[in-house]
Image (cartoon, rainbow, N blue to C red):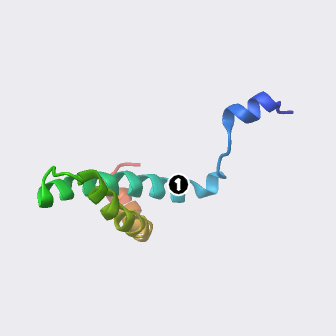
Amino acid sequence: MTTNTQTRRTGFKLHTRLMPVAFAFYMAGIMAFLMCLIITAINQGFVEGYFVQVLRAYTLAMPSAFICVMAVRPVVLKLVKWTVHP
């Protein structure tokens, strides 16, 4: 039996079958944000409103990155299987 303290400590967690989706979401989010930081800095420099421009780019990049990560996941898994010893 779990107590309220244990429930509060662990919080909400997804089922393990959703691990690939959670991984793709976090990976896409982090990579899209980093790329938006870099590409905005290269294209516009560190000007006034830089972070606002990064966030605007991120609103398009994050969903795109998530879809792409989910789409290429099977290919990447095969490539890893071919290149790594079991």
The amino acid type of the residue labelled 1 equals Ala
Q: Nearer the viewer, residue 55 or 34?
A: 55
Q: Residue at x 24, y 54 (%)?
A: 49
Residue 23 spot, x, y in % from top left: 48, 53
Q: Is residue 66 left or right of residue 11?
A: left
Q: Relative to 81, say whether 1 is above or below.
A: above
Q: Residue at x 30, y 56 (%)?
A: 52
Residue 45 spot, x, y in % from top left: 12, 53
Q: Residue at x 20, y 58 (%)?
A: 40
Displayed quadrant of residue 56? bottom left
Q: Secondary structure at mark 1?
A: helix
Tell which residue pokes out farthest to the right in this image. Answer: 1
Q: Relative to 37, say whether 69 is above or below.
A: below
Tell which residue pokes out farthest to the front in this image. Answer: 48
Q: Which residue is mark 1?
A: 22
Q: Nearer the viewer, residue 72 or 22?
A: 22
The quadrant the N terminus occupies is: top right
Residue 59 spot, x, y in % from top left: 38, 64
Q: Is residue 24 left or right of residue 85?
A: right
Q: Relative to 38, say whether 65 is above or below.
A: below
Number of residue marks: 1
Q: Residue at x 15, y 49 (%)?
A: 46
Q: Nearer the viewer, residue 28 or 36?
A: 36
Q: Relative to 11, say whether 50 is above or below.
A: below
Q: Is residue 37 left or right of residue 12?
A: left
Badge 1 crowding class, 10 Å Cα cut-off, few under 14, some 14 to 19, many 20 or more, is few
